[in-house]
Image (cartoon, rainbow, N blue to C red):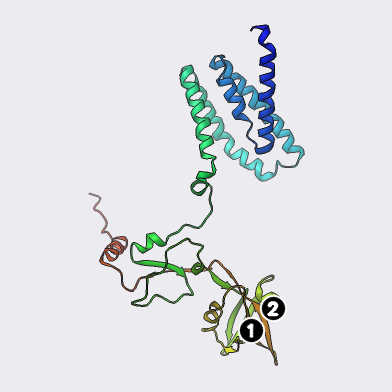
Amino acid sequence: MNLALLPVFLGLGAFIGFLAGLLGGAVQISGPPVIVYWLGSASDMFLARANFIAYFATLALGMGITYWIKGLLTAEATALALLIGPLQIVAQYAGTRLFHVASARTYRLVAYGIITLSALIGMPLFDRWLRATDELDFAPFLAAAGLSIGPAHEAPPMVGAPAPPVGEPGAERMREVRVGFQFKMEGGRTIVGNVLAGTPAWRAGISAGDELVAVDGLRVDAMSLGMRLQEKEPGTTAAITVFRRDELLTLQMAVESGPPTRLAIRALPEPTPEQRAILDHWLRDDPPRDAG
């Protein structure tokens, strides 16, 4: 090594170490600067690989001690490590065998390719396909077969009615009013069975054992109660009239909405011939094939 260039190499090494530490502390990704630095050097691939092993082994040891001190090495994390550890050992052995049959150029190309692929996968552009937890929109696929999906409390579509809107699963039609109580029938009366804490019914003061009489002054029973509540707009209030023993009470309950607890798939009243054909194909019962 040219001693005149020693300060340059030391300064560059210090900068790479600082950048790796900064990325590691911020987002737990300290490897790319070190990998790119060694892959771009004039060192042969054996020396570069040895430096990678030494760097990541030291990093893993330091992080393991830090996690242990901070109490992050929980039983669940340890069990997961023991579960995937053997798989990693097998994969590492296979990688070692491949390393010895690859040329230096192939080694560098594969390493650069992995770094590039990792960077692309981590881009927010692909979050919807790789990391999103949004509900799947089944409506377009069901519509192709003359089917619709919606909350179970909705009335089935009538003949001549327009097709239900097809949009995001979070559209307003895919929400229902939440009250927070369950009811049961006793001698022809609609009785509150239980009330969940923190729900609109709980905050309004509705109690188990109350007899539901009316919503907004209109008498309800087990059949009409849910329909009457679903007519209310979220953010408004509903006047719930109940009998509590012999006392008649009117309680103001906030109307809140959320995703429906039950969905129903229904056939469209007037499907096209193409939709009927697709649905028949889906539902057909193919005869078992003769094994001979």
Residue at image coords 28%, 67%: 272
**49 lies above or below 276:** above
Quarter of the picture containing the N terminus is: top right
User: Circle 1 sits in a helix, a strand or a loop, which is it?
Assistant: strand
Would residue 94 be visible to someone looking at this image? no
Residue highlighted by disc 1: 240
In this view, the residue in front, 200 or 90, is 200
The three-letter amino acid code for the residue at tag 2 is Ala
Q: Would you name the residue on which mark 2 appears?
A: 204
Disc 2 crowd rating (10 Å Cα; few below 14, some 14-19, many 20+) is some
Residue 255 pos. (x, y %): 61, 75
Q: Nearer the viewer, residue 171 or 70?
A: 171
Indicate the position of residue 157 as horizontal and vertical percent values. 39, 75
Q: Is residue 96 visible?
A: yes
Q: Are marks 2 and 1 in contact (CB under 8 Å)?
A: yes
**From this viewpoint, which residue is outermost toward the bottom?**
246
Q: In this rendering, is residue 38 above or below 195?
A: above
Measure the alpha-carbon separation of dots 2 and 1.
Answer: 9 Å
Circle on res. 144: none
Question: In the figure, residue 51 lies in which quadrant?
Answer: top right
- Left or right: 289 as drawn, with respect to 134: left
Residue most extreme to the right: 69
Q: For this rendering, which residue is in front, 157 or 54?
A: 157
User: Is 241 on the left-hand or right-hand side of 114?
Assistant: right
In the image, residue 257 sits, relative to residue 215, either above or below, namely above
Q: Amino acid at mark 1?
A: Ile
